[in-house]
Amino acid sequence: MAFPLRISLALAALTVSGATFAQSAKLGAIEVSDAWSRETPPTAAVGGGFMTLKNTGKTDDALVAIKADVSKTVELHTHIMEGGVARMRAVPKIPVAAGGSTELKPGSFHVMFIDLKAPLKPGTKIPATLVFEKAGEVKVDFLVEAFGARRTAPAHKH
């Protein structure tokens, strides 16, 4: 392997590993992993945030808020079925059962960044603070991925 190619591969590996660490965090019994968002078109007013929350403790906890400067408002949401149609609804909290995990993903629980201050661009990070009912606050970065890069939402209507 040519020397410049080895350097390029090593730098690429460091870049990827840094992004992985930025997407994870731990606070007491709460572990946050794979925090990500999806790029938005230039005129989009909203964006979504997704991650996995794991509770290794013996007491139930819940995500009750998220603070982020990327938008004017940040809400916790879920999808519910009404008359055979999936609709998004704000929720006061997202439970994380003791010894369990909760996945925030398209078509389920998720974060809504409302009134975006700028479009979300692939490769950028959204710094945020997650607020848990019992564990407290933990900082995490959502990595913005290209639309369709690795995840798709289930088909539904709004």
Image (spheres, rainbow, N blue to C red):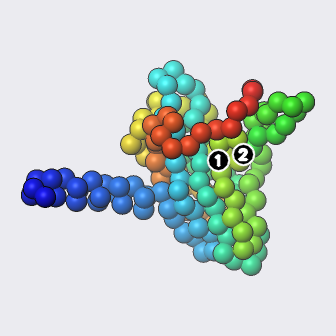
Q: Residue at x 66, y 55 (%)?
A: 103
Residue 140 visible in the shown view:
no
Secondary structure beneath disc 1?
loop
Quarter of the rendering occupied by the C terminus: top right
> Quick check: 153 above or below 36?
above
Locate residue 113 relative to residue 122 in the image: left or right.
right
The amino acid marked with disc number 1 is Lys
Please tell me how crowded label 2 is: few (under 14), some (14-19), or many (20+) other residues with Cα within 10 Å: some
| Image x and y of residue 136, in percent | 63, 65
Give SS at disc 2: loop
**Where 80 falls versus 15 (above or below)?**
above
Relative image position of residue 78 (x, y in whole percent): 75, 43
Residue bearing the label numbered 1: 105
**Callout 2–callout 1 Cβ contact below 8 Å:** yes
**Residue at image x 59%, y 39%?**
152
Instruction: Answer few, some or many: residues within 10 Å of disc 1's Cα (few below 14, many 20 plus, some between 14 and 19).
Output: many
In this rendering, the answer to whether 8 lies above or below 24 is above
| Residue 101 visible from this viewpoint | yes
In terms of image quadrants, where is residue 16? bottom left
Residue under numbered circle 2: 108
Residue at 9 percent across and 58 percent down: it is 3
Residue with the most extreme bottom position: 58
Q: Residue furthest front?
A: 1
Q: Quadrant of residue 98?
A: bottom right
Picture residue at 29% right of the left edge, 59% below the top: 14
Could you tell me the amino acid type at mark 2? Ser
